Image (tube, coloured by chain):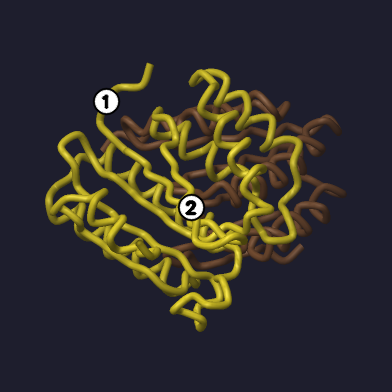
């Protein structure tokens, strides 16, 4: 069985996909995706509170891709995208599901996974404190990220970060992040 | 000092910093990929204003969305205001949030807990 991003995704998503993108994630692509999803949510009269949460989480997801993706493996089909990423936005019963995907070099997995695990074992209150701590103590990195994206996503959704690393070859993994933004009241 | 007047775009806010009135405003969406590029001139301008501030400075923050990268830059703006306040000048921050936007209210409360400047949380009811 070879590596196939689309097959994996077909298993993960059902029919209510409102946006599916894979390719280079640059500033124009981000603008276009944000506009498209926002328009679609307005069209279906989505409640303002949920609409704002989805928009916020989408901004952070896309900018995580923009700032942090590793370059694609040498034998990957798309060699032209400098920042290759994947995004799916799907309407689900309780809200919206946002799936992102990007290559991560094997050397960078441990750090990323440790960060996610730290967030996932924290309570909502601890995540708030972690956010404030990073906001106040960490400088913006050379890549332009603030180190707050995942913490902010966990804080705004109130949900655990659901993720998978699928091995591409001995040096690269494809990292999927499944984010649920729902209407459930946070506790 | 020349005022700063920047028209808003879908990704960057409207900014009006007027040293003669002592009223500063940031309004709209702040979600650029490179927030430092946008905010650095504002922070530098505040460094200048800090030298001879008015006895009272009012800051109105009325953001619809802001990304985490902007959140650090906004903190830098507030740190300049904190310095002005610390030098015995009156500074007041009005943090506006839309009705039911608890995330935006919480964001304001985050800053309020970090920065030693009086904040007023103002709900915008439509």
Q: How many marks?
A: 2
Q: Which residue is mark 1?
A: A184
Q: Residues within 10 Å of mark 1 (few under 14, many from 20)?
A: few
**Residue B99 placement (x, y as % from top left):** 32, 32
Q: Nearer the viewer, residue A10 or B59?
A: A10
Please tell me which residue is depicted at 37% across the width and 42% down the height of the picture. Answer: A179
Q: Secondary structure at mark 1?
A: loop
Q: Looking at the colours in the rendered structure, which chain would you say is drawn in yellow?
A: A
For the question of whether residue B70 can be seen, the reply is: yes
**Residue A104 placement (x, y as % from top left):** 57, 57
The vertical placement of A120 against B3, above or below, is above
Where is residue A135, by image quadrant? top right
Q: Is residue B25 left or right of A58 when viewed as pictured?
A: right
* Palette colour of chain B: brown
Q: CA distance from mark 2 to mark 1?
A: 27 Å
Please tell me which residue is depicted at 71% across the width and 51% down the height of the picture. Answer: A140
Q: Nearer the viewer, residue B24 or B107?
A: B107
Q: Earlier in the sequence, mark 2 or mark 1?
A: 2
Please tell me which residue is depicted at 55% across the width and 45% down the height of the picture. Answer: A149
Q: Nearer the viewer, residue A15 or A96?
A: A15
Chain of the residue that carries numbered disc 1 in the rendered image: A
Q: Which residue is mark 2?
A: A175
**Residue B96 placement (x, y as % from top left):** 46, 37
Q: Is residue A1 left or right of B81 when viewed as pictured?
A: left
């Amino acid at each position: 069985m070879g590596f196939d991003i689309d097959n994996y995704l077909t298993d993960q998503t059902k029919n209510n996909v409102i946006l599916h993108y894979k390719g280079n994630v640059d500033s124009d692509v981000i603008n276009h995706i944000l506009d498209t999803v926002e328009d679609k949510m307005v069209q279906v009269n989505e409640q303002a509170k949920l609409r704002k949460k989805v928009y916020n989480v989408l901004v952070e997801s896309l900018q995580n891709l923009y700032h942090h993706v590793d370059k694609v493996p040498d034998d990957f089909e798309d060699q032209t995208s400098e920042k290759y990423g994947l995004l799916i936005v799907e309407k689900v019963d309780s809200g919206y599901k946002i799936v992102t995907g990007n290559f991560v070099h094997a050397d960078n997995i441990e750090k990323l996974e440790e960060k996610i695990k730290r967030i996932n074992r924290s309570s909502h209150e601890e995540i708030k404190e972690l956010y404030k701590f990073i906001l106040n103590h960490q400088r913006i990195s050379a890549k332009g990220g603030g180190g707050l994206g995942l913490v902010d996503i966990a804080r705004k959704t109130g949900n655990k970060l659901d993720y998978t690393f699928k091995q591409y070859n001995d040096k690269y993994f494809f990292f999927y992040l499944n984010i649920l933004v729902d209407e459930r009241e946070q506790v | 000092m020349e005022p700063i007047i920047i028209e808003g775009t879908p990704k960057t806010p409207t900014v009006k910093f007027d040293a003669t009135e002592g009223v500063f405003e940031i309004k709209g969406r702040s979600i650029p990929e490179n927030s430092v590029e946008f905010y650095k001139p504002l922070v530098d301008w505040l460094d200048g204003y800090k030298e001879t501030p008015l006895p009272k400075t009012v800051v109105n923050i009325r953001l619809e969305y802001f990304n985490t990268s902007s959140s650090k830059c906004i903190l830098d703006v507030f740190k300049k205001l904190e310095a002005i306040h610390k030098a015995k000048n009156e500074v007041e921050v009005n943090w506006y949030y839309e009705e039911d936007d608890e995330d935006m209210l919480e964001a304001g409360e985050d800053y309020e807990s970090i920065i030693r400047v009086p904040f007023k949380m103002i709900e915008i009811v439509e």
